[in-house]
Image (cartoon, helix red, strand yellow):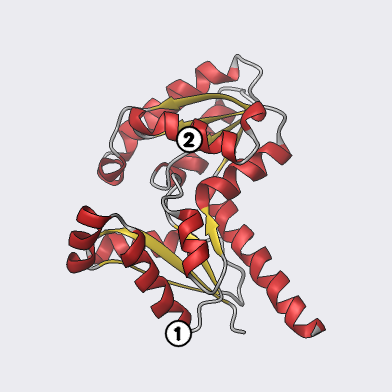
Amino acid sequence: MRSTINILIAVSLPSWWEEMAIRRYRAFAAPDVEVMGAAFTAQQQACASTSGPLMPLVEMGKRAECAGAAVHILDCFGDPQLEELRGRLQQPVVGVGQSAMMAASVWFSRFAVITSERATRDEITSHADRYGVLSHLTDCRAIEMAAADIPDAREEALRRTVLHARELSGTECEAVLLGCTELAMLAPFLEQALRHEGRQMSVVNPIAVAQKWAEMTLSGRLHRLHLT
């Protein structure tokens, strides 16, 4: 089995953005792990808009498995169609939202989520309940900015994220989990801003967590093969 992780991107992206979406996982990859991936084609996006993202994602996942992918990461904090994908693909599928929230619940007694859009807050809370970590989630806030707008407005996105984190730092919350893969890229800058103000709140990058979770999954599967 090859040490290859595939990034499942459930939208159609310009080529430069697609490369960025994959590269941000590679930044946290172990030296011996290959990270591959692709976004929807225009035809797949049209299919997804009428029938949902499942079939295009299954098609992309199966193609990646034929190319050697041993684990998939679903590149969306909302984990769309996660269980369905796990039932349709041969290799394991790691959900960014699930892995990040479960890790945060182990590392911290209480954590909050800052996401991009208000419409996703109820979904994140519902997922936290389904993943068994709702008792650790103190708050879920949105910066009121579309995820697609964040790469071109990072300074404003960071400013809004810092404002929410400041308010949360005065509560029992120990950590902020960035509940959007676009916001994830702001993690080091948010942490720097909080440290500069003397705030000890931790910042969790969901992309970093998902990548390491996928690598642990890959390692476990490789170990199991060696035992058989």
Looking at numbered disc 1 in the image, what kind of residue is underneath it? Answer: Cys
Residue labelled with disc 1 = 66
Left or right: where 164 falls relative to 99: left
- SS assignment at label 2: helix
Q: Is residue 220 above or below residue 109?
A: below
Q: Is residue 1 above or below residue 16?
A: below
Name the outermost residue toward the right: 227
Which image quadrant for residue 169? top right
Looking at numbered disc 2 in the image, what kind of residue is underneath it? Answer: Ile
Q: Split into 4 quadrants, where in the image is the C terminus?
A: bottom right
> Is residue 201 visible in the rendered structure shown here?
no
Q: Which mark is residue 124?
A: 2
Lower position in the chain sequence, tag 2 or tag 1: 1
The spot of residue 144 in percent (x, y) is: 31, 27
Q: What residue appears at the point 62 percent right and 23 percent down from the top-left corner? A: 198
Left or right: where 220 falls relative to 33: right
Which image quadrant for residue 163? top left
